[in-house]
Image (cartoon, grey):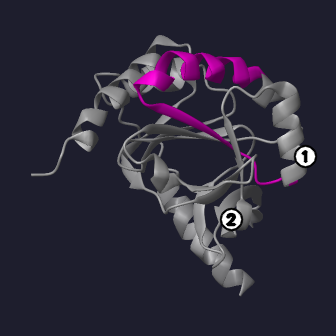
Amino acid sequence: MKSAIQSSMFRFLSALVFFILAAPAGLSAADLVGSANIFMYPRPLPLSDLALKTASGQNISLSDYRGKVVLLHFWSIQCPACKIEEPLLENLKRNFGPSGLEILGVNLVDSPQAIMNHAAANRMPFSVVAGGGGGLALKVVNLNGKNTAFVVNPKQEAILEVPGFPTTYIVDCRGSAVGYSIGVARWDNMAAVGLLQGLISDRKTCLAPKS
């Protein structure tokens, strides 16, 4: 069983770690990687729906945000780098939230009560969610001698890699991951801002009524 899970995760990782980048909206890969610590996929990566729970106990899913641009921001309470990135995310939420950007701070390692207390005490600038009853968990595996972690569903299928905190996935209005960042992303960088503006502008194609 363990070897089967690791084999599945290895196949997922192999598909995930193409670092030949292609940035949309006229931005070069070098712009994003070099200046903003954001990596773009060669093509959008469709995501499985994620069942999550808010700090107030409400059940939500990633599909609830279809039509919006979503940052899936994986963090933990004991993460110094996460605290560094929070003001940048707060600015994004303030500037782009009204236009259709949603930020979900996903915590799969701390207890729901600890997450709720931390979010309230620190006035987290974005929606904070946990695994809830959907069976999502963060599973550490060793691949080729190196530890990494994956978000897995109840069937132990790997959904997303989270090698460390913070890790953020950029999800377009169709529910596909188009890029990611490991560590602190420089969201105030012009290349990052241009990327998000392009994705938000593209929302019109998702919101248009089907003929």
Q: Where does label 2 land, which residue?
A: 136
Q: Report helix, strand or loop for mark 1.
A: helix
Image position, residue 173 (x, y; %)? 37, 42
Image position, residue 18 (x, y; %)? 47, 49
Q: Is residue 130 left or right of residue 97?
A: right
Image quadrant in which you'd find residue 203: top left
| Rendered residue at 29%/25% (across/down) | 25
Is residue 110 visible from the viewing direction of this image? no
The residue range painted magenta reads: 84-111
Q: Is residue 18 above or below residue 2?
A: above
Image position, residue 199 (x, y; %)? 36, 31
Q: Is residue 86 magenta?
A: yes
Identity, as a three-letter code, of the amino acid under mark 2: Leu
Identity, as a three-letter code, of the amino acid under mark 1: Ala
> Which label was assigned to residue 93?
none
- Dot 2, crowdedness within 10 Å: few (<14), some or many (≥20)? many
Q: Where does label 1 land, which residue?
A: 114
Count how many numbered circles sit on residues in the image: 2
| Rendered residue at 50%/25% (across/down) | 97
Quarter of the image containing the N terminus?
bottom right
